[in-house]
Amino acid sequence: AEAFGVFAPRRSIEENAHRAVDAVARLSIEVGTAKSIQMLGGKPDDVAKLTELALLDVNGIFGARPGMRQDIKEMFEAAMNDPQLYPPPAAEKTMTARL
């Protein structure tokens, strides 16, 4: 949170962590790197396979909190094409040089 300038000393560690995550999401949108699964070529039909693959990932198996199938599925569904998290790209600005 401090690195992103959103640290609030009277807030809890968890609240400051959420503020930092929000700052990263805003930055990603601002610079145009926020891409949904659909923007990257995925389809809603891919959610089941993505969920299965995530459940097989070693980090999920040995992590402090194992991923639950429904939670992972919902995460992929949100990442599929949530317009709030992944706004459509703005029309690109073109620059013309004056000679």
Image (cartoon, helix red, strand yellow):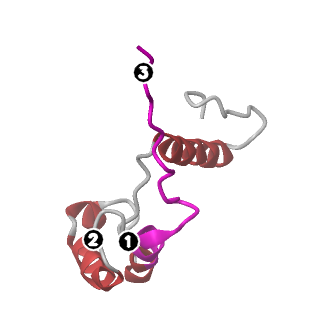
Q: Residues within 10 Å of mark 2 (few under 14, many from 20)?
A: some
Total count of labels: 3
Figure check: 70 above or below 34: below
Residue numbers of the magenta segment: 74-99
Q: Is residue 82 magenta?
A: yes
Q: Nearer the viewer, residue 98 or 69?
A: 98
Which residue appears at 29% of the width and 72% of the height?
42
Contact (CB < 8 A) between labels 2 and 1?
A: yes
Instruction: Tell me the mark number nearer the camera, choosing from 2 and 1.
Output: 2
- The amino acid type, in three-letter code, at marker 2 is Ala
Residue for badge 1: 67
Q: Is residue 25 part of the magenta span, yes or no?
A: no
- Residue found at x 27% / y 71%: 54
Q: Return the disc, 1 or 3, that comes first in the chain's sequence.
A: 1
Q: Residue furthest front?
A: 99
Between label 2 and label 3, give the one nearer the viewer. Answer: 3
> Which dot marks residue 54?
2
